[in-house]
Image (tube, rainbow, N blue to C red):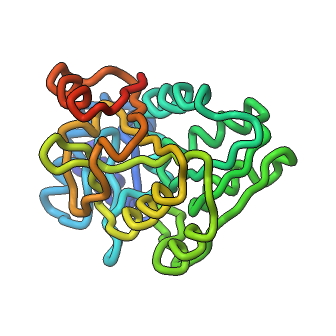
Amino acid sequence: MLAVERIRLIQCALQEEKQVSVSALSARFQVSEETIRRDLEKITKTDPTIVRVHGGAYKAEVFDSEMPVQLRETLSVDRKKAIADNCIPLIHVNDTIMLDCSTTALYLAMLIRQRGFSVTVITNSLRIVEVLQDCDQIKLILVGGLFRKNTQSFIGYDATAMLARYHADRCFISCTGIDIKFGVTDNSEYESHVRQTMMQCSKERFLLADAYKFGRSFLSKMAVPSDFDAIISDVQPSSEWLVHLEALHTRLIC
């Protein structure tokens, strides 16, 4: 197959499915992943609505440029599973926990289900509800509000007002980036408000951030590292970060 025809088919897939992964396209067209990456680079240069990400690409919605949750679930899976494993010792029988709409929190929910924990889970994530809905030992509370399609989550005043009615033993939330100068940031101010409310309603607060998120900053400032009881990651960050977190008296679990 000629490269021009392959690129045309990839463009069709992006229009129809809204997202593609490098590995899936490589298998479909029987070419190397590096070839697919070059194809995607060519597509993004001619179509500004296509956004390249590590492991794939997606078509940004007119009102929401967030990467679709279905694509995020397939990226950095090993990192997310490692973080979820590190969270498990912090969860106890009969705990009430808050989980945000991040895919790292989703993998934690999957592990909670697998381990058979008896807990109460409060979340704004429809995907987490789908994972836990048939677990008899789990009391599940889904907050409502404005539905955000790309993240399959509920946001806005109604979501934060409902969250504020509850109290949790601990919350597990993620972010888009964590930077030494700008702190913990998110690319959505709406999700940032939900996460801030979860922090305010929880005795203990845990930030889930894989190594890729260190040194990155985005639109909405959510918190600073010292606001959390611990940052939970997959691997140890650079020595600069270790010194910074020690100066903030912020525990790192990895």
Indicate the quadrant where residue 180 lies. Answer: top left
- Residue sitting at x 22%, y 45%: 39
Image quadrant in which the C terminus is located: top left
What percent of the width, then of the height, locates residue 25? 39, 41
Most foreground residue, 247 or 242? 247
In the orientation shown, which residue stands out farthest toward the right?
A: 136
Quadrant of res 233: top left
Please indicate whether residue 166 sits to the left or right of residue 39 in the image.
right
In this figure, what is the number of numbered marks? 0
Looking at the image, residue 134 lies above or below residue 192: above
Give me the residue at 48% from left, 72% from top. 155
Instruction: Give percent across and percent down for residue 190.
Output: 38, 70
Instruction: Say which of 199 and 140 sits in front.
Output: 199
Residue 188 occupies quadrant: bottom left
Q: Name which residue lies at 29% across and 60% down.
A: 187
Residue 234 on image: x %, y % = 40, 25
Looking at the rendered image, the quarter that the N terminus falls into is top left
The correct choice, above or below, for 33 with respect to 217 in the image is above
Residue 143 on image: x %, y %: 62, 69
Q: Looking at this view, is 85 or 18 the one in front?
A: 85
